[in-house]
Amino acid sequence: MNKKSGVHATGNRPPTSGEVAHLRPAALIGLLHSLVTITCFVVGIGLSLSGTLFIYLLGQVVLALGFIHAFVLLHEAGHDTLFPLRGINRIVGHVAGFLTLL
């Protein structure tokens, strides 16, 4: 919606269900995002345990990305928009909350 004119981007009507279908939660996409987050944490910790400064710093960057991604998962799971099933959203949300120390 345009704040100045109060008009939706689709004109004077709200969007149809077909126009927002891509916003529905999908299990495969949620699983992919969850695996990316776990991978960031595992790789980041592994690199951070390295003896060299450059690899350690690289691990810290990967861990930072993992924390950001985990917070996004927590947020989406809290709105039940990560997975189609509410129970899975709750489990992933709790794990993501633990990973982000919230």
Image (spheres, rainbow, N blue to C red):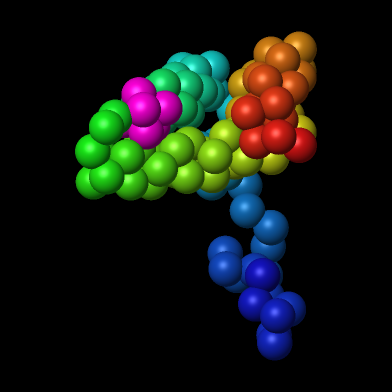
Task: Please state which of residues 19 and 89 is positioned toward the viewer in this rendering.
Answer: 89
- Left/right placement of residue 37 relative to residue 7 reads left
Q: Which residues are magenta?
A: 44-49
- For this orientation, the residue located farthest to the bottom is 4
At 62% across and 40% down in the image, what residue appears? Answer: 71
Task: Please state which of residues 89 and 49 is positioned toward the viewer in this rendering.
Answer: 49
Residue 32 visible here: no
Query: Where residue 14 appears, x then y in whole percent?
Result: 69, 58
At 47% across and 22% down in the image, what residue appears? Answer: 38
Q: Is residue 55 above or below residue 25?
A: below
- For this orientation, the residue located farthest to the front is 51
Q: Point out the image quarter for the N terminus.
A: bottom right
Chief SS of the magenta region? helix
At 57% across and 64% down in the image, what residue appears? Answer: 10
Query: Where residue 53 appears, x then y in whole percent?
Result: 27, 45
Quarter residue 36 falls in: top left
Q: Point out the image quarter for the C terminus.
A: top right
Query: Where residue 27 appears, x then y in whole percent?
Result: 54, 17
At 41% across and 21% down in the image, what residue appears? Answer: 42
Query: Where residue 97 appears, x then y in whole percent?
Result: 71, 30
- Left/right placement of residue 77 relative to residue 45 reads right
Residue 88 visible here: yes
